[in-house]
Image (tube, grey):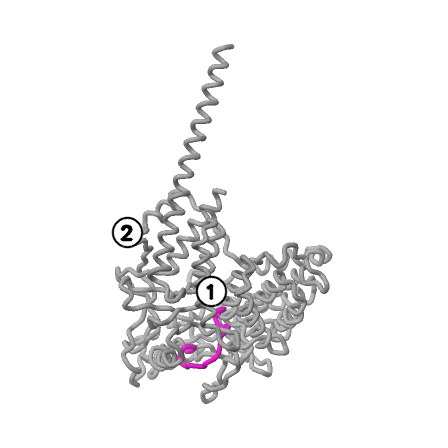
Amino acid sequence: MKNKLKIALLMMLSTLLLTSQASAQSKKINDEVRNKMLQATRYMVDNVSVNGGYVWYYLPDFSRRWGEMEAYKTMIWLQEPGTISMGNLFLDAYQATGDEYYYQAAEKAAAAIIWGQSHEGGWNYFVDFAGDRSMKQWYNTIGKNGWRLEEFQHYYGNCTFDDNTTTDAARFLLRIYLEKLSPEYKPALDKAIDFILESQYPLGGWPQRYPLRYDFSKENHPDYTSFYTFNDDVIMQNIDFLIQCYESLGEQRFLDPIQRGMNFYLLSQHSTGAWAHQYNMDLQPAGARSYEPNALVTKITCRNALQLLKYYQLTGNQVYLNAVPKAIEWLEKTSLPQNLTENGKYSHPYYIEIETGKPIYVHRKGSNVNSGVYYYDYSPDNLIIHSYGKRAFPFETLKEEYKKLKNTNPKEIESASPLLPGIFTGTSTPQEYPRVGDEIITPPDIKKVNEVLKSLDEQNRWLETHVMISNPYAGDGKKSELTDKYSQTYVGDETDTSPFRDDSDQQYISTSKYIENMKLLISFLNSQK
């Protein structure tokens, strides 16, 4: 009996010792993760940022830098993974660690974003702290010569919803305001909300840019920036933001624009069941950039149909569910034959001609913006790579989700619908930021954590190779004979300032790499709580 008791005591002591060792080891790795996160962040804030803002990539000596295109040293980029993404990352780190340094870094990013807010309330793709004269010079040189980046070829002097620029800036201001209910962010947030509400058309859609401009129409090609725009999620993101505002701020005024926005999906659905990238003021499908023809678009159709399923769940209104089968039927009809799927990599052509229902494909000839043309035909060969003519998207998910919701009792949907008239389900308003569409990150294993920690260099940088850079500005492109040499490249000749991937071993400071590694470490810390 004594021996059994002794053995039991020894086992208990052994277990306590192992538990203590494991706890000590866990604390050690947690401390190291926190230290490395802070060191990397201090480098970005102290050495990389410009007035609290960021672009995407930098040479280590900061002699050149890039957002979607090359940037001046006085510029910051708002588009992901620029200043807004960095600000959100800082708030993520603050919530994971409680360290006020990260909140202060987020405040600096917010200050940069607010500095760049237009007097109307929205934002351009980037901010230039040197002012309009510097920005106009950039547009007249670097921007003007980005062959495939037509949205940067003109200085509009207004704001853009493209690539979620204005919406994401407004969303970040909503988030940082709600983090501590800091009143200093309320005026800029209110101004952004009012801008989004004002820019909505009566029928419920939004233009790509606002205030409206018509300055850069070409022969047989109107300025598309005033068109109703689904491309790059303009309408979807504005609706989602207004839903976030309603859920967090609880203001009834958001319900009508949300409803009109959702109904615009129904108004704009083509008789075939499909949607286009843009629509003119007569609600007719319309082209935009010269490599975006007037056509119906398979990817947009799948995405919009998925949104209708979401709107059904949000409202319980069967009209959204009932519009989906026609879209599914059209997508079934327009799928690629097996011999054109490139071994199953793609499922659909991107563009479908409205009049014939045939796939149309985009090609290009020439070498720069002044010596180059885009054209379309029925040939699936020699496709441009920056906007490829074949796509894969979650079509099977769409069909499965529709089937599931169709077979769900409508009463069950209605009971969980937060946008039904007169119903508000918020429980912690206005102190909770509603997360929409956040990526789910699986907590990493310790091996991956250690790899990330060890990859931080002696200057506390996570460097990256093979990023997107560009040719330095070398004057306007010259007109020359059309060539097929650049028909399947990201960039044309040496005068084209469009980005291309650097295949050399050159290392770059990268906001996307910093964000990626920080998210992994934050996920690890959160998994240890």
Q: Is residue 142 above or below residue 442?
A: below
- Residue 152: in magenta span: yes
Query: Is disc 1 placed on a helix, strand or loop?
Result: helix
Query: Is disc 2 placed on a helix, strand or loop?
Result: loop
Left/right placement of residue 175 relative to residue 498 reads right
Look at 45% across and 81% down and name the residue there.
156
Image quadrant where residue 21 sits = top left
Q: Is residue 483 above or below residue 69?
A: below
Look at 41% across and 35% down and name the residue there.
24
Identify residue for label 1: 110
Whole-percent x and y of residue 394? 53, 60
In the rendered image, the residue lying farthest to the bottom is 219
- Mark closest to the chain's N terminus, 1 or 2: 1
Q: Judge by depth and name the residue closer to the eye, 82 or 397.
A: 82
In the rendered image, the residue lying farthest to the front is 183
Mark yes or no: residue 488 visible: no
Identify residue for label 2: 458
* Residue type indicated by callout 1: Ala
Q: CA distance from mark 1 to mark 2?
A: 29 Å
Q: Which residues are magenta?
A: 150-165
**Mark 1 or mark 2, whichever is nearer to me:** 1
Whole-percent x and y of residue 181? 56, 59
Left/right placement of residue 423 relative to residue 484 reads right
* Residue type indicated by callout 2: Glu
